[in-house]
Amino acid sequence: MRTITYLQAVNEALDEALAQDERVFLLGEDIGIYGGGFGATQGLQEKYGAQRVRDTPISESAIAGAAVGAAMTGMRPIMELQFSDFITVAMDQLVNQAAKIHYMYGGKANVPLVMRTAAGSGTGAGAQHSQSLENWMAHIPGLKVVQPSNAYDAKGLLHAAIKDNNPVMFYEHKLLYKTSGAVPEKAYDLPLGVADIKLTGSDITIIATGIMVDKALQAAAIVKKKGISVEVVDPRTLVPLDEQTLIQSVAKTKRVIVATEAVKNSGFSAELTAVIAESDLAIKLAAPIIRLGGEFVPMPAQKSLEAQATPQVDSLVQAIEQSMSYKEDQA
């Protein structure tokens, strides 16, 4: 199987979707000749024309509103927000319209749109361009939230999102765009709501999302030299959430770390923790649940400070060793 980057996988999925379904079209700032803020739509306007790959004014609210309206008429728009931070400008359209319309009209209307956006820190882009706000959208009934951690998942999940009849928020971490992985040349779907075990282990479970999946795998490789076997579980979609796979993994290891890049305070890591804490496992764990997340500060622009504001591989290693230090009768 050939190897391509995460960014190429996204571009390929968009290309295939445009070719497969005439109802699919793209809209966003600079997605045409420029090819998108990070290059995800490179070459697509040349191939499909300006009617199906539409440049828009710099107005996230207008982009979202147009996408909602088009979706209600039977089209399948894929809107791009260059930075997920600016979803704040589009939230009325997404939260009060896209998420609600199907329910308020008794199921007679669907809003099959995909909102793609680049998220996360690590580029030194500052507090207004480096946030991880996926938890905001995961809180809204009626929206699905996807957060792929590698190129293979990005292509398959994007195809599934485009075919879904609900509004799907698709979060792509900026630092993952240049990472590579094996990706089939043909189009394929990965079902939304199915977690993936990225690494099988027996001593401790790390439930990680987005960029934290790769860091969890790096930490697992480090502690393996000390005889610790780590299982890494990637939910892949925050909504719907595959609770069963999370619980089955923790039932096996009895120790769990939850890791997200998003700010820990009121973040999605709390929801993942609650899945374990509210299950029968709560009284069977061998160690307290450990939750890692971003510091409760606006993201610094200086890269060394940015790294200190988010969980890194060494903080995961430290958390693994802390959890493993507990004896079962101490928990």
Image: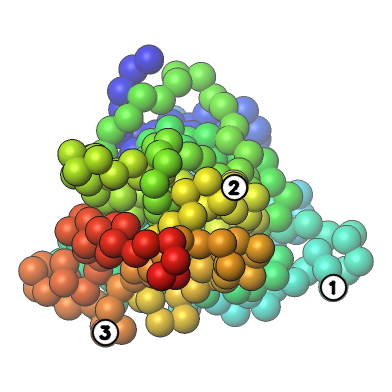
Residue extending farthest to the top is 1
Callout 1–callout 2 Cβ contact below 8 Å: no
Of residues 227 and 84, the one drawn nearer to the viewer in this rendering? 227
Residue 220 position by quadrant? top left
Apparent side of residue 308 relative to residue 155 in the rendered image (left or right): left
In the picture, the quarter occupied by the N terminus is top left
- How far is disc 1 from disc 3 in space, using C-alphas? 38 Å
Q: Residues within 10 Å of mark 1 (few under 14, many from 20)?
A: few
Mark toward the viewer: 1 or 2: 2
Q: Identify which amino acid the numbered label 2 is placed on.
A: Gln
> Which comes before the other along the chain, label 1 or label 3?
1
| Circle 3: element type | loop
Q: Provide residue 115's location: percent of width, then percent of height.
A: 53, 57
Q: How is the image coloured?
A: rainbow
Q: Label 1 belongs to which residue? A: 104
Kindly state the secondary structure of the residue where label 2 is placed: helix
Q: Where residue 164 sits in the image (x, y, percent)? A: 69, 46
Residue 152 visible from this viewpoint: yes
Inspect the image, locate mark 1, and give the three-letter code of the amino acid beneath it. Met
